[in-house]
Image (cartoon, rainbow, N blue to C red):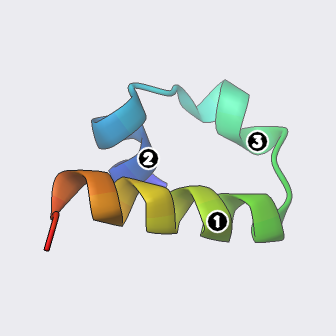
Amino acid sequence: MADLALVFHWDPDYMDGLSLDELAQWRERARVRYQPE
């Protein structure tokens, strides 16, 4: 969740409302945005 907070500036309260599947999808988007190939 820290990577989502870093990349998208989301606070923990917002991320608490997401399912694990949603968190995994957003984590991949954060990885791509932070470390483009």
Identify residue type, mark 3: Asp
Identify residue type, mark 1: Gln
Please name the residue shown 64% across and 70% down the image. Answer: 24
Please name the residue shown 69% across and 27% down the image. Answer: 13
Q: Which residue is mark 1?
A: 25
Please name the residue shown 49% across and 55% down the image. Answer: 1
Q: Classify mark 1: helix, strand or loop.
A: helix
Of the 4 image quadrants, the one containing the C terminus is: bottom left
Q: State the residue lying farthest toward the front.
A: 37
Please name the residue shown 31% across and 63% down the image. Answer: 32
- Residue 34 screen position, x and y as percent: 20, 54
Nearer the observer: mark 3 or 1; the answer is 1
**Quarter assignment of residue 23:** bottom right
**Quarter assignment of residue 19:** bottom right
Nearer the observer: mark 1 or 2; the answer is 1
How far is disc 3 from disc 2 in space, using C-alphas? 12 Å
Q: Which residue is mark 2?
A: 4
**Side (left or right) of 2 relative to 20:** left
Indicate which disc, 1 or 2, sits on the residue closer to the N terminus. Answer: 2
- Residue 17 screen position, x and y as percent: 84, 38
